[in-house]
């Protein structure tokens, strides 16, 4: 009889594990985006906006591409060029970053996210 009891626990544990996994899978992208948005200093926030926009556009894992190459691959996204300029500014002259640059970068990133959601078919994987 002890064998039957121990297998019955799997019917309780398995749904909890699956639910925890699904919750984590849903919360992780939100948490990553939020942590990029509230990072300090402002240079990290600008780069967080850039990385988020690249992730939204599906350019993840292509670290050898320059900002200009990414802009050239997505010419229809007009907010990408100014965001790329801010990202390049952070990379090459971080000490001269204007105080409003991080907020501006996230406005561009949010617009890119909205554009991507509007133009990507719901059946795309």
Image (spheres, rainbow, N blue to C red):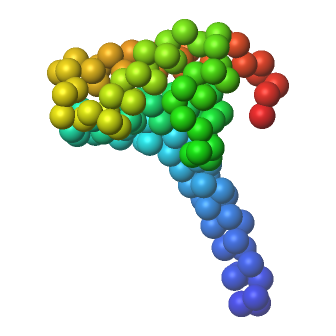
Return the x and y of residue 53 as percentages of the image width and height.
51, 28
Q: Is residue 45 visible?
A: no
Return the x and y of residue 41 as percentages of the image width and height.
21, 38
Count of numbered circles on the image? 0
| Drawn side of residue 21 relative to residue 2, left or right | left
Q: Is residue 73 visible?
A: yes
* Most foreground residue, 16 or 104: 104
Q: Tell me: residue 22, above or below residue 13.
A: above
| Drawn side of residue 42 relative to residue 106, left or right | left
- Which residue does the image show at 61% across and 61% down from the upper left? 17
* Most foreground residue, 116 or 86: 86
Image quarter for residue 84?
Answer: top left
Question: Which quadrant of the rendered structure holds the N terminus?
Answer: bottom right
| Drawn side of residue 55 relative to residue 104, left or right | right
Return the x and y of residue 33 as percentages of the image width and height.
44, 36
| Drawn side of residue 39 relative to residue 58, left or right | left
- Which residue does the image show at 68% across and 64% down from the upper left? 14
- Which residue does the image show at 71% across and 81% down from the upper left? 5
Extreme residue in the right direction: 123
* Most foreground residue, 23 or 85: 85
Return the x and y of residue 39 as percentages of the image width and height.
28, 39
Extreme residue in the bottom direction: 2
Q: Tell me: residue 33, above or below residue 81.
A: below
* Most foreground residue, 46 or 75: 75
- Which residue does the image show at 22% across and 26% down from the upper left? 97
Question: Which quadrant of the rendered structure holds the C terminus?
Answer: top right
């Amino acid at each position: 009889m002890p064998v039957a009891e121990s297998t019955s626990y799997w019917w309780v544990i398995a749904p909890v594990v699956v639910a925890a996994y699904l919750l984590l899978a849903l919360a992780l992208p939100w948490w990553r985006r939020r942590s990029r948005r509230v990072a300090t200093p402002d240079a990290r926030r600008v780069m967080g906006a850039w990385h988020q926009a690249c992730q939204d556009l599906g350019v993840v894992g292509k670290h050898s591409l320059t900002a200009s190459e990414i802009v050239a691959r997505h010419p229809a996204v007009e907010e990408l060029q100014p965001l790329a300029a801010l990202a390049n500014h952070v990379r090459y002259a971080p000490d001269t970053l204007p105080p409003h640059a991080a907020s501006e970068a996230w406005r561009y990133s949010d617009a890119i996210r909205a554009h991507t959601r509007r133009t990507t078919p719901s059946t795309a994987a």
